[in-house]
Image (cartoon, coloured by chain):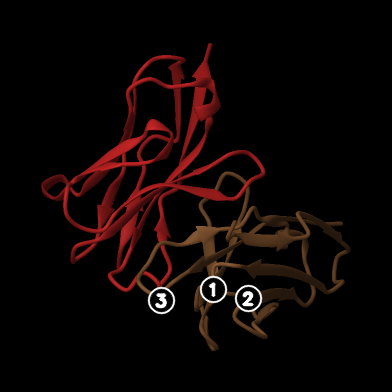
Chain colours: A red, B brown
Amino acid sequence: AQSVTQPDIHITVSEGASLELRCNYSYGATPYLFWYVQSPGQGLQLLLKYFSGDTLVQGIKGFEAEFKRSQSSFNLRKPSVHWSDAAEYFCAVGQGDTGRRALTFGSGTRLQVQP
Amino acid sequence: DAMVIQNPRYQVTQFGKPVTLSCSQTLNHNVMYWYQQKSSQAPKLLFHYYDKDFNNEADTPDNFQSRRPNTSFCFLDIRSPGLGDAAMYLCATAAKRETQYFGPGTRLLVL
């Protein structure tokens, strides 16, 4: 069965500092990987996704993620964090036919941004 | 803009009183999902529709049911809400083999 681990429950960074959120997955075949962001009381917004091809994926709001098969990781990065980035971030893995099957989510990382 | 809409955004119900949450989409996606998300937890899939084909997760309580009368609409019915059913309920849609897009959610409070 597939699984996703986000080892950091809570991260605090200063505004303008760089950010890396960790995500490790377990899946037998090539996974479909996603990062979603959730602001308090809101739904999930897609930041970026990896299906195949270039392992460095660019997303919205200046985020990027790198797929590393050898490490089973899909870490999310941003070079300079803004106060508006404070939110909960979820990594998710889907099976090949992702339109039919559900995503498996990690437990989330809550990002706090200090002025 | 094409989108996923959930109504109401906030729903208060009484213990044991049936409640229905609704989801609509203008994306014309053939797959629709319902997730339950409790505070500080990841979303948990309750069930999904692939066109009219209903797929229930094994651990979804019988208290939860769903209807999809057409492509655009999907409903979540909670027959007898308990205090433990208070949560955010998220609807998502996807085209086959594509990304899931989420609505803003409905926060359910059970008194």
Can you say whether A7 is above or below A79 in the image? Answer: below
Residue B28 numbered mark, or none: 1
Q: Which residue is mark 2?
A: B72
- Rendering quarter of residue B91: bottom right
Residue B70, percent from left and from top: 64, 84
Is the residue A46 above or below the residue A30 in the image?
above
Question: Is A61 positioned to the left or the right of A21 in the image?
Answer: right
> Is A7 situated above or below B100?
above
Residues at marks 2 and 1 touching, judged by CB atoms closer than 8 Å: yes
Query: For the residues marked 2 and 1, what is the alpha-carbon distance in whole angstroms?
Result: 7 Å
At 28% from the left and 40% from the top, the residue drawn is A65
Q: Element at badge 3? A: loop
The amino acid type of the residue labelled 3 equals: Arg
Tag 3 subunit = A
Residue A49 % position (x, y): 33, 51
Comparing marks 3 and 1, which lies closer to the viewer? 1
Tag 1: residue type? Asn
The residue that label 3 is drawn on is: A100
The residue furthest front is B1
Residue A27 vertical position relative to residue A57 in the rendered view, above or below: below
